[in-house]
Image (cartoon, coloured by chain):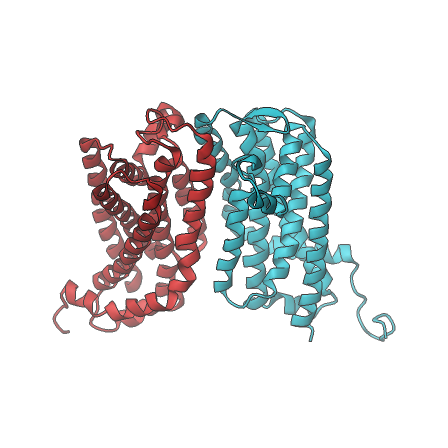
Amino acid sequence: MTAALPLREGVGRQVDYWLTVARRTWRGSVVSSFLSPLLYVVAMGVVLGGFIDGDPDQLEGAPSYLAFVVPGLIASHAMQTAVGETTHPVMSMIKWQRVYDSMLATPLQVPHVVAAHLGFVLFRLVATCAVFTLVLAPFGVFETWWGAVLALLAQVLVGFCFATLVYGVSARLRNEEGFGVIFRLGVFPLFLFSGAFFPVTNLGEVGAWVARLTPLWHGVNLSRMFALDHITWWVAGVNVLVLVVLTVLGWFWSVSGLAKRMAS
Amino acid sequence: MSAVDAPGRAEPLGPLAAMRMLMLRNYLSYRAAWKLYLTGFLEPFFYLLSIGIGVGQLIETFEFNGQAIPYAEFVAPGMLAASAMNGALLDSTFNVFFKMKYEKLYDQILATPMTTGDVARGEIAWGQLRGGSYSAAFLVVMVAMGLVHSWWALLALPATLLIGFAFSAVCMAVTTWMKSWQDFEKVTLVQLPLFLFSATFFPITALDGWARGIVEVTPLYRGVVLCRELTTGSLTWASAISVVYLVLMGIAGLLVVRRRLGTLLLT
């Protein structure tokens, strides 16, 4: 057996593969990546928001409902993109198209394969959230430019956190039925109840604490605090810590999941 | 030459018997996916709690047909109608596409005494069975949450079936022209604006001019208004327009499906 490949080189060898995938598939995701959330922004933020008083005391410091809802929507969109990219595509690489099998027949190893796939998801997250931020900036929803940049980082972080966790689940699932359950019982309730559409305090005390335990809330909260320049630093620290810890755990969960799966 | 004159040829099933046969087939194959079926009940319920209650606390009341109603009461019938559309749309695009293109199910069915019309009617009726059960559960939740104050609400169930029928038929017709999974992006492109702008979440008065005119002639708007009129008990003549609109849309879809399946699979 040859000496193990360093992680950096292993990932580097897959860059052209993933670039090709990106070049060939971006058209298919334009609608879901950009148009859908933009329609949500217009319907919920602009039109419905027209009926809501812009009271900063009720809206976690936001001067309007639009300014309140936009950072939350981008963060939840990051989650949805990440979950979308780590469910069916992962199962396809393992089971349907068996791309991983052929990759692992070369000197590449499981951690390289996982890192490159997650790297591609990271690239998609940065691109999607950045385009959003640029499109929405003229609506005056960001208080400062650096707040917009930090909010973007928060959105990418929460998306990446979900990518690592869900990748680990997908690597362990035997068929796609589980994905329906992930979307219906995981992604969808998170999207609706993690503070993207309304302050979690509207859920009552218990409901608010449950919401604060979800990873998406940490991302939504972080993204909103930065966008509105209404930051409580210790809370931001907790938010970042939770997301980083979950991401690290998710990484090991993903690598161990794929390693077991490919060995079986 | 009619089928009856041909010697030794099997007698075609009657339309009802054929519909029953296809629904039975779908039931047998769907039994394994009961988890997916059960979780489907939760979706509109989650929306109602989140948008109705969570966002509702930020909004006073909305005016509808001269009545001021709380936001949750306003949004719930909208969700009811929208989820009838979403369910019908998913069933009649993804599932039908899969059956047509990958499973070749309809080729097999048409090799039996069943006809293209039977396929169209059977698939749509099956979709209504599933969608109708979701709508009924949703109505029960609305009643339990005190969001319904009129007996007319009983008619909201047939109204959702009508919405489901209209969308199933048209979407199944559209699916016969689809070539690849990429085409489903176009379905989303139509579905999402319908869902978000059909006065589901806000009164139609929020829009004006051409935007309002466009929304008023879209099918989901007719369905939303119909459901809202029934659950709030404020029926108008426009309700009859909505009913006729949806019936005609469904029949048109059905006719196209029958003809298209004929060209695709029987020539």
The residue closer to the viewer here, B187 or A7, is B187
Which residue is at a point 51% across and 67% down the rendered structure image?
A: B180
Q: Quadrant of the N terminus of chain A?
A: bottom left
Could you say where residue B176 lies in the image, as x and y percent from the top left?
A: 61, 65
In the displayed structure, A156 sits above or below B232; it is: below
In the displayed structure, A51 sits above or below A138; it is: above
Q: Decide if residue A175 is in sight here.
A: no
The residue closer to the viewer here, A232 or A66, is A66
- What hue represents chain B? cyan
Could you say where residue A212 lies in the image, as x and y percent from the top left?
A: 31, 33
The answer to which quarter of the image holds residue B18 is: bottom right
Q: Quadrant of the C terminus of chain A?
A: bottom left
Asked whether, in this view, residue A70 is left or right of residue B37, the answer is left
Q: Residue furthest left?
A: A3
Could you say where residue A213 lies in the image, as x and y percent from the top left?
A: 30, 34
Q: Decide if residue A249 is in sight here.
A: yes
The answer to which quarter of the image holds residue A11 is: bottom left
Could you say where residue B267 lies in the image, as x and y percent from the top left?
A: 69, 76
Asked whether, in this view, residue B228 is left or right of residue B121, the answer is left
Which residue is at a point 39% across and 45% down the rendered structure image?
A: A187
The mark total stands at 0
The residue closer to the viewer here, B256 or B118, is B256
Asked whether, in this view, residue B22 is left or right of residue A235, the answer is right
- What hue represents chain A? red
Which residue is at a point 59% across and 66% down the rendered structure image?
A: B177
